């Protein structure tokens, strides 16, 4: 059974998107801190901070489920090559394709804002990585030839003459 299309009118969807980002400009919360030194040391401060944007927040604002948003994101990923080709050739997109492009732009904008919030510590950097799918480590595999033993790594001399090595799968 095919899913019903929640977003069929790109003009209405654009209005909802614009309304969400306009609302977020005035969506504040408060954090609390304490004066660390000086005459007022120990005094509690209430600091107004703008709440960051999140996909979950956008979905609640639009009245949809995160799973529905992810469904549209998946649809865009499956069709993006043909959509980009149409855009490059100045061909008109269908209303559905226009909605998919708008939601892809929302995803990109929110991801960028989350990354910025993580870099500026407005959002926990670990949370920002999870929410944007970024990884903390990169797995790099390469062949290394050691011609001189011992070797120096990070200013530490390591004697590898009698070291045991494990060969990893080359998949």
Image: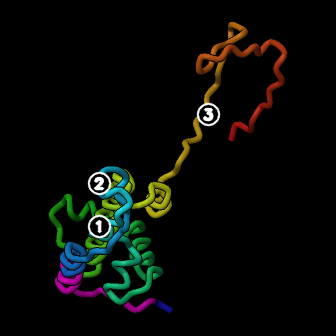
Highlighted range, magenta: 3-18
Crowdedness of circle 1 by 10 Å Cα count: few (<14), some, many (20+)? few
Residue 141 is tagged as 3
Q: Position of residue 58 (x, y in %)?
A: 33, 78
Q: Which residue is pictured at 44% across the width and 71% down the height?
A: 74
CB within 8 Å, label 3 to label 1? no
Residue 76 is tagged as none
Residue assigned mark 2: 39
Q: Which residue is pictured at 27% across the width and 78% down the height?
A: 99
**Local SS, label 3:** loop
Task: Specify which label sits upstream in the sequence, 1 or 2.
Answer: 2
Q: Which residue is pictured at 48% across the width and 61% down the height?
A: 127
**Local SS, label 2:** loop
* Quarter location, residue 72: bottom left
Task: Specify which label sits upstream in the sequence, 3 or 1.
Answer: 1
Task: Specify which label sits upstream in the sequence, 2 or 3.
Answer: 2
Between residues 117 and 30, which one lies in front from this camera angle?
Answer: 30
As drawn, is 111 to the left or to the right of 127? left
Residue assigned mark 1: 47
User: Disc 1 and disc 2: Cα gap in Å?
Assistant: 19 Å
Q: Position of residue 3 (x, y in %)?
A: 44, 89
* Quarter location, residue 26: bottom left
């Amino acid at each position: 059974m095919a899913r019903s299309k929640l977003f069929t009118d790109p003009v209405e969807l654009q209005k909802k998107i614009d309304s969400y980002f306009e609302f977020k400009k005035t969506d504040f919360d408060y954090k609390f801190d304490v004066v660390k030194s000086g005459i007022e040391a120990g005094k509690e401060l209430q600091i107004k901070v703008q709440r960051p944007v999140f996909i979950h927040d956008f979905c609640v604002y639009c009245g949809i489920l995160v799973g529905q948003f992810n469904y549209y994101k998946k649809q865009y990923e499956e069709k993006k090559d043909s959509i980009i080709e149409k855009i490059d050739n100045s061909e008109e997109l269908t209303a559905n394709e226009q909605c998919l492009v708008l939601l892809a732009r929302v995803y990109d904008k929110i991801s960028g804002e989350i990354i910025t919030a993580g870099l500026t510590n407005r959002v926990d950097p670990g949370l920002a990585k999870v929410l944007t799918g970024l990884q903390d480590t990169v797995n790099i595999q390469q062949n290394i030839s050691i011609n001189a033993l011992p070797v120096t790594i990070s200013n530490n001399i390591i004697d590898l003459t009698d070291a045991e090595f494990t060969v990893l799968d080359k998949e």
